[in-house]
Image: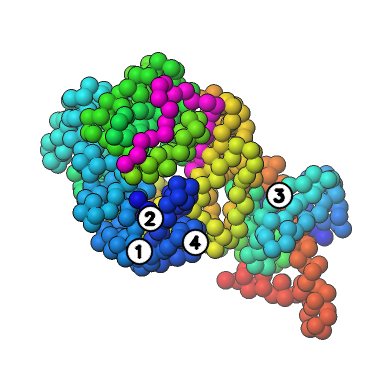
Amino acid sequence: MKYFVTIDGQERVVEVDGDQVTLDGATVTGRLDPVPGTPVRQLVLDGNPITFTVEPLGPGRWRVGRGGLAPEVEVLDERLRHIRSLTGGGARHGASGILKAPMPGLVVRVEVEPGQEVAAGAPLVVLEAMKMENQLAAPVAGTVTAVRVRPGATVEKGAVLVEITST
Amino acid sequence: MRRVLIANRGEIALRIIRACHEEGLEAVAVHSLPDRGSPHVRAADHAVALGGVAPAENYLDIEKLIAAAKESGADAVHPGYGFLAERAAFADAVVRAGLTWIGPPADAIRAMGDKTEARQRMRAAGVPIVPGGAEPLDGLAQAAPMAQELGYPVMVKAAAGGGGKGMRVVRTEAELGPALEAAGREAAKAFGDPSLYLEKLVERPRHIEIQVLADAYRTVHLGERECSIQRRHQKLVEEAPSIAVDLDLRRRMGAAAVAAAKAVNYRGAGTCEFLVADDGTFYFLEMNTRIQVEHPVTELVYGVDLVREQLRIAGGGAMQVPEGELVPSGWSMECRITSEDPANGFLPDTGTVEFLRAPSGPGVRWDAGIEPGNEITLHYDPMLAKLIVWAEDRPAAIRRMRRALNELIITGVATNQAFHRRLLDDPAFIAGEIDIQFLERRGDLLDAVIPDADASAIAIAAALAESDARGARKPAVAAAGAAGSAQSRWAAEARRDGLQ
């Protein structure tokens, strides 16, 4: 079975045939041994063990951790990948004019008003978390179309703070 | 002294409880609501629930803490670091309640806590200080000419500050107003006092601090700690000794630190922080009148237990540190493991620790305040644990730290572990070419880039996980006689997903 594996926006093709694994034209013997009761799994490639944590996030979605980084990884087969390409799925998170809270926190200040023109990187909102003030900048240049929070509000991670129409 | 209440949480509470037990003392823990399952609570002989979530309702509530000490039969209080550790009013309240305060006298805390008063006292004691205004600022009108006179860049600092909160570097006059405003707000929130002062910024200095210890008979120093690896004034890696300090500089800085401590009649463990310029010129920054986060690196190279010394000194005893000049042995390094997510601009992450494998083996010390199941919230400091190593010299300590970091596994909350691994592989860090602006220049070390080789291995692991999951699911579906395969359910799920 051919799998299309996307890590950090980069796709890699991994072919799995029994214990034979092929990536970038190189075939190795590979298996993934569980460590029961833990998310730890031992990937053994041609006899060389590499430790990972592997956590299921949903159909075809995994969190694979190694060395302190644990990216979300999407694993699709050819059929699912085709469906995804038809529905435009995957691009739905790409609305870059929307500033979302990168963490839960307290809104200290809002630097912009609807209708205001902003440059990319302009300060939009100051969010306080763990007693540190964090300035959140405009992801794109454009016109502020909506401000969804006011100072004093507590927001969850992912909450929409400011919307910008890109110019 | 028989029973010590620890007015703190996390790794330092556990550290102090361990020291109490080793000294034959009983330990009383206090905890907030989310901390009820924390390791420090289980390690104590008695635990008092203070309730609440925000620190103001528990770890910062002096009345509640004194009441907890009294009702639990404690006869002494250890404040740890942070929270109330450098609040003279808390030291006073503890003493007024007839309990032993495990820390310096309230007057010493007051003298060093007011950074402007501290500067005046240090100047009088002959301790070198960074040029700057000794007076608290009274708004922009007064600050602007003062900054002009010192010459940009200058530093705005909270008079009651510490830990990087309420601090701003100002490079041009235009930045001064906004910096005063932001620093004042942060200071008011963190310390309950918005007072600020100005200081000349020493460019590219190292941050090197001297550990002091004082009992009723003598005041000694225990060498330096190199703390230049900082992000936004928060230390991330500390070492003892420092590659930049030779015997002569250690003697001179040590003498200055001892003079500083004596000038305020210091007792117990404390730390004098210095900026050290390229040419070895050093300036007193401030004295931290408490045990420091990074105290273990000193313990490992000097063979002392600073927390147990604190307990002995508070109990009226003498320190057990040998007389005469002390010489550091080998090299120690500490990496602070924080819940700051490198893939999200180093912003604090939250969650529940699901799995934890702590490093171990020769020369490795793991001082942690977390275990699986513990909730990481935004209410407390993001530091989860300290990974400390000792080895015979700096290169060996770096190799040992790499090995230990490779053993560490934490899931459920993002950490800065990958940053530490990158730092330890960096040629400039390995060469010891560091100063407090190192990470400002080296933003690349903070980026959460997955090395290509790792990404390939991750891709294979993910494909095999997916393949195994499908393989495991199919027979179960067949056995249940369900209509439709696992495949098609997945496809339906993906379609739904894709159409959202």
Q: Secondary structure at mark 3?
A: strand
Point out residue B71 in the picture as x, y percentages from the top left corner.
32, 65
Q: Secondary structure at mark 1?
A: loop
The span picked out in magenta is B316-339
Contact check, label 3 and label 4, Cβ < 8 Å: no
Look at 35% across and 63% down and name the residue there: B72
Point out residue B303 in the picture as x, y percentages from the top left corner.
50, 32
- Amino acid type of disc 3? Thr
* Crowding near the residue tagged with mark 4, few <14, some 14–19, many ≥20 C-alpha atoms within 10 Å: few
> Dot 4 corresponds to which residue?
B42
Q: Secondary structure at mark 4?
A: helix
Front label number (3 vs 1) = 1
- Amino acid type of disc 2? Arg
Give the CA distance from mark 3 to mark 1.
46 Å
Give the CA distance from mark 4 to mark 1.
16 Å
Q: Chain of mark 3?
A: A
Please indicate whether residue A103 sits to the left or right of residue B449 in the image.
Answer: left
Please indicate whether residue B59 sits to the left or right of residue B263 in the image.
Answer: right
Q: Residue B218, located in which quarter of the rendered image?
A: top left
